[in-house]
Amino acid sequence: MKWIVVAVNFLVVTTSFSQTLYDMRWSSEGINYTGFMIYFNEDDIYLRVGYMYDQSYNLTHTEYQYNLDYQQDGIVLMEGLEYDYIQETSDSEYEPFHIFWADDDNGNWIGPYAIDNYHLEDDNFDEIVEVVLVEVDPSQLTEAYLQQFYAPSEEDYYILLNAAQPETIEMPASHNGPQASLHLIMIANTLIPDIGPSTSLDLHNASNEFEGIANVLSMNFNKWIISDKNFNKEMVLATLNGFSPGSNDVVVLMYSGHGFRFSDQQEKFPQLDLRYNDYQPFGAETCINLKEIYDAIESKGARLNLVIGDCCNNNIGVPKQIGSSFLAARSTVNASIPKLKKLFLESSGMIIAAGAQQGESSWGSNNNGGFFTNSLIGSIREEVSKLKYNDEPTWEDILMHATQSTQKKSQMCGNCKPQNPIFEETIGN
């Protein structure tokens, strides 16, 4: 019945949100390589690499993904896939480099290191080289820096140049009613010993995220926190009964804690366990189904409603502690204001989502929070990023990407069992 904690850090050891930028430098066989990586999520990564050969400058583009086959050998490998020359001025016979971390004899993760494709295929790890990795702030994306990695004619070049430029918000011309408000109800089991530190992170991360969105969109922001010794069913019901959103408002309810399902339960969404210690009685007075909360929120008549439960959805779960530390997207926002408007000011409808399907556990980390909460916030950031210029943002895409990211995180953590979020949405513009 538990939302299970695992000690997983996706290097850098902070919350793993989307679109982190990295400067990467290494030397191999007498050649100095300079790389610029954009990390959107576990399956959407690319690296530009520039280097001098025969006094000429070459520039390559390589797509990356995590290769899980090496984890059984204590290696976390970011595998370079297909590559192209952006600029080829000398015949250097470039081999794409792979970036990896290794588990040392003391159980600590060390790295990152680089190894080229030729030596990796030969399983020759004697030719590894250290990588100097530095996170890049968007304010550092000057013309001089970016021209190491992009031609001025490339669309990405101008998108990156503009990434740090401030945007202003203009309310939709058709908006003549009262100012929209964003209401956040955060229910987090912060006192329970096994997952309390992780749910506290979820509370902090979600509060900061949605307050920041409200501020940049000039929305009023209201917040209800149900945690610590107020974490109980009575407080949840009182909060649901007591708040009254307007017809143009957005309501976000997020739950982070233990979850379960009854053996004869037909409803696919989980029961929420509203006890903060194991000595409290278990029964109807201490649990509520996520769908019941969804129905209560829907009846309030707000324009847009999101009901999210990051919890297990099975009969039992066993806490496990494992450790890993490797590269993942982190906390860069680079949000496009028009995209945020599309999601939060111009959308209406209902969303209900749970972090795991029937019979599964929901995993999390004391360093990063719940995999699903973490992935959902990261997916929102990716969908509204200035660096994503192809499509308009949609809640369906956000939920699909959050699902895929949660699934990958459960695969990457090693000892976790599969975690497959579920959701339903009826969203219109």
Image: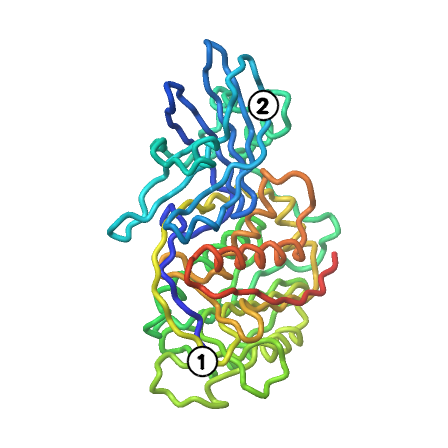
Whichever of labels 2 and 1 marks the residue nearer the N terminus, that label is 2
Q: Quadrant of the C terminus?
A: bottom right
* Label ID, residue 199: none
Residues packed near mark 1 inside 10 Å, few (<14), some (14 to 19) or many (20 plus)? many
Q: Position of residue 341 (x, y in %)?
A: 64, 49
Task: Determine whether the residue tagged by mark 1 lies in a helix, strand or loop.
Answer: loop
Residue where numbered disc 1 is placed: 274
Measured Cα–Cα span from mark 2 to mark 1 = 56 Å
Q: Residue at x 42, y 45 (%)?
A: 327
Kind of residue at badge 2: Tyr
Q: Residue furthest left?
A: 106
Mark whose residue sits in front, 2 or 1: 2
Q: Residue at x 34, y 64 (%)?
A: 321
Q: Nearer the viewer, residue 273 or 124?
A: 124
Residue where numbered disc 2 is placed: 85
Q: Where 283 sits versus 192, above or below?
A: below
